[in-house]
Amino acid sequence: MAGEPVVLVVEDEPAQREVLAYNIRAEGFDVLTAAAGDEALETVRETPPDVIVLDWMLPHVSGIEVCRQLKMGTDTSKIPIIMLSARSEETDKVRGLETGADDYVTKPYSVAELLARLRTQLRRVRPSTVGERLDYEDISVDLTEHRVYRSDEELHLGPTEFRLLTAFMERPGRVWSREQLLDRVWGRDIYVDSRTVDVHVGRLRKALKAGEAGDPIRTVRGAGYALG
């Protein structure tokens, strides 16, 4: 299904990685996996996830170092990271959080607890997953009733334009490439020509009455599109 939250699971133990991936998929999320720190960094560069579940002990590049690098990156600093570790000492937990981890779960852990913490982080970055309202300047999106308003006037958007606007509204200011928008709005398993994005952005601008009320969507030459 297009628009599913993407979770990256970084775990070097195959059995644990598969159990995590299985349970997270069962919650309706899209899952990417990596078995090492360098592989995780490459995956994030290619397909930025919504949340990362990151093991502390990894080959090549440690989880702490992966966390540090991602939190220092302009494009990746706001991706929530849940750190997994067999280290239960308070000093280790503090170190993990100080490196930038948004949450810290000690092994062995309950899958149900981890999923609850995952949903908490997703609620921060993808409010559409919990059916809330998004607001940006004079635009409001009611995610429960699938209604869009601009300056209190209800607008009529097609399903694709609605998903496109939701992606923009969740992260104002972020520049989305056409490929990233294809993954988010159409789904990673569906082939659609990247020029299709331009067509639907044009339709979205028309639906938002960009000519009359001002165009909130910015075209970034050579990069893609952004809201604001």
Image: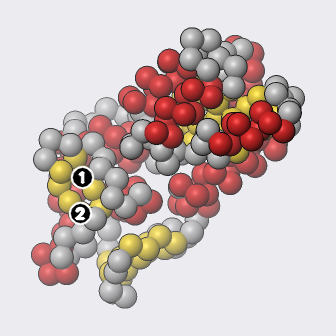
Q: Decide if residue 104 is in sight here.
A: no
The answer to whether 209 appears left or right of 73 in the picture is left
Could you tell me which residue is drawn at 18 percent across and 51 percent down? 220
Label number found at residue 179: none
Percent of width and height locating residue 153: 33, 86
Badge 1 vs badge 2, beta-carbon distance below 8 Å: yes
Q: Residues within 10 Å of mark 2 (few under 14, many from 20)?
A: many
Q: Amino acid at mark 1?
A: Tyr
**In the image, is 130 to the left or to the right of 173?**
right
Q: Position of residue 211 (x, y in %)?
A: 12, 75
* Above or below, 20 relative to 5: above
Vertical arrangement, residue 98 with respect to residue 41, above or below: below
Q: Residue at x 22, y 57 (%)?
A: 201
Q: Work out whether mark 1 precedes mark 2 in sequence or the reverse, and give the earlier one.
A: 2
Q: Which residue is mark 2?
A: 217
How far across and how far down the image is residue 88, in percent? 86, 32
Give the side of residue 18 with respect to residue 73, left or right: right
Q: Which residue is mark 1?
A: 225
> From the viewer's perspective, is residue 123 above or below residue 105?
below
Say what amino acid the circle numbered 2 marks: Ile
Note whether residue 63 is visible.
yes
Marks 1 and 2 sit apart, C-alpha to C-alpha, by 7 Å
